Image: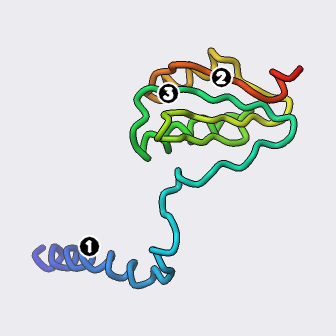
Amino acid sequence: MTALRILLAATLSLTPAVAQAQHTHDAAAHDHGRWRHPPNPPPAGAETAVVDVLGVVCDFCATALTKNFERRTEVSAARVDLDTKTLTLTFKPGQSMNDAQIGDLVIKSGYKLSAVRRSGAANEA
């Protein structure tokens, strides 16, 4: 049993060193912050919704919201801006979600909805 514990401890302590040795690119040359990259412009004719979300404070929060919305068939992209506490949704052309659906999914994700602002195809008609 003692040998098994020693083997487990050695494996757990050496694994990060091996992983770091295989990380060959220059980490200082680029930003590792996924949420700091600017969003791609929405496709022509696509509707967007900017959702003010209360309680979004970290990358974990942003990841949870993004994953929950990107699972929806209507959503082509979801992006959280932690500085402004907003979720920007880009819908597939000809598709959308109403404010109640967005609010329900925000609440199910564990956050509170403050406001929804829309732009794109639905507002230009």
Residue drawn at point x = 58 percent, y = 27 percent: 51
Q: In which quadrant of the rendered image does the N terminus lie?
A: bottom left
**Could you tell which of marks 2 and 1 lies nearer the N-terminus?**
1
Q: Nearer the viewer, mark 3 or mark 1?
A: 3
Can residue 97 be seen in the rendering of this structure? yes
Q: Residue furthest left?
A: 2
Viewer-closest of 103 and 87? 87
Q: Which residue is mark 1?
A: 12
Within 10 Å of disc 2 (Cα), the crowding (few <14, some 14-19, many 20+) is few
Q: Residue furthest top?
A: 100
| Mark identifier at residue 25 | none
Residue type, mark 1 in image: Leu
**Could you tell which of marks 3 and 1 lies nearer the N-terminus?**
1
Residue 60 point in image, percent of width and height: 42, 45
Residue 65 point in image, percent of width and height: 52, 36
Is the Cβ of the residue at disc 2 closer than 8 Å to that at disc 3? no
**Going by the image, does 32 lie left or right of 71?**
left
The kind of secondary structure element at disc 2 is: strand
Across the whole image, how many numbered discs are drawn on residues?
3
Residue drawn at point x = 49 percent, y = 40 percent: 64
Residue drawn at point x = 32 percent, y = 81 percent: 17
Q: Nearer the viewer, mark 2 or mark 3?
A: 2
Residue 101 point in image, percent of width and height: 63, 19
Residue type, mark 3 in image: Val
Q: Which residue is mark 3?
A: 53
Q: Which residue is mark 2?
A: 117
